[in-house]
Amino acid sequence: MDVDMTNMFVLAGGTLAIPILAFFASFYMWPAAIIHVYNWYWRRRLGLQVDYLENRGYRFCYSHRGKPGPGRPSILLLHGFSANKDMWLPMAKFLPKHQHLLCVDMPGHEGTSRTDTSDYTIEGQVKRIRQFVESVRLTRRPFHLVGTSMGGNVAGVYAARYPKDLCSVTLISPAGLPNESRFAKCLLEMEKEQQLGSSLEPQSIPLIPSTPEEMEEMLKLCSFVRFKIPQQILQGLVDVRVPNNDFYRELFMEVVGEKSRYSLQENMHLITAPTQVIWGKQDQVVDVQGASLLAEGVSDCQVELLDNCGHSVAMERPRKAAQLIMDFINNKYNASSGSNNHKKLS
């Protein structure tokens, strides 16, 4: 499962973001305000506009840039557990400016409606994403779907349920598969000690930090790259997340519950769209062996494993991830069009 690492230090696509954030913090701004201002700045810098969409009493929040056009499929990006649309900012920096790009807040996250547990299972999230896709009229032509971690689970099941919607799909370190990672073993121990679903508290779940110290530990779990994060920024990240911890706990229980834990494994044989899998070899949250399962279980599957990279691929290796995705789209589009001379998207 992914986490909201993007609201911190790599939004500029490099470590320069750390001193910039520290500079803001030196003026004694509220730590949480630093995070919001910084994300706003990079959305503007990258040409991403935030909009809200109401459909049948449900509100979606999403950022977007570019317009649909012939010869280039739109790209819809689905973030992971407890993150939001801004987690894609580091990668958006390296995607073509003309590319039609949409980054939606997943059900219950950030500006998208928070309802009940029926929306938080993987099947429930798939239905809500389909509602969003229909509302923004992405169904007019096949689009490319990208999902990471929990969002990768959702993207894979979406591809199984709505194959005609997609021209291709990218799954980045997706959840929903058998998992023998460090985090999974930690979760198994917690299940033995505390009956999962009844007495497990947010502070006992490594992906739901409540203090700067727990936030630092979560970042170590989710990233192979080690950063020195200023205390003010760690505090800001905690301040942004803590008001949502009850929701994160409820969501966590759903995505690791019986209905959702192996959703991708149970549906991968139904995926017919060309599929790209990108995974960090040092992932401690979701076992990289899942890439082999997908390669065997999906008919048209291409796997890319990244050295010196953990779970948060889009933040640790944003340039490489963007390049891999665009190369995959270009190759699949050119192959399906039957023309080797077609202008590449990137």
Image (cartoon, rainbow, N blue to C red):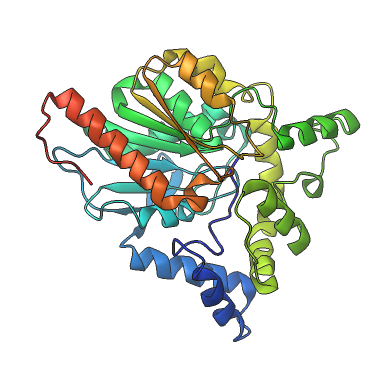
Residue 206 screen position, x and y as percent: 74, 46
Extreme-front residue of the structure: 307
Left or right for 342, reference 202: left
Residue 232 drawn above or below residue 49 = below
Observer-nearest of 205 and 21:
21
- The picture places residue 218, in percent across and down from the top left corner, at 70, 51
Classify residue 260 by image quadrant. Answer: top right
Q: Position of residue 7 (x, y in %)?
A: 55, 60
Across and down, in percent, residue 36 comes to 52, 68
Residue occupying the point 55% across, 64% down: 9
Q: Is residue 305 left or right of residue 217?
A: left
Locate residue 265 relative to residue 250 in the image: left or right: left
Query: Farthest residue toward the bottom?
Result: 27
Q: Which residue is at 44% across, 47% downward?
A: 59
Q: Quadrant of the N terminus?
A: top right
Residue 325 visible in image: yes
Instruction: Confirm whether residue 211 shows in the render.
Output: no
Picture quadrant of residue 323: top left
Count of labels shown? Answer: 0
State the image quarter where residue 183 is shown. Answer: top right
| x 20%, y 39%: residue | 72
Q: Nearer the viewer, residue 253 or 225?
A: 225
Residue found farthest to the right: 193
> Toward the viewer: 243 or 292?
292
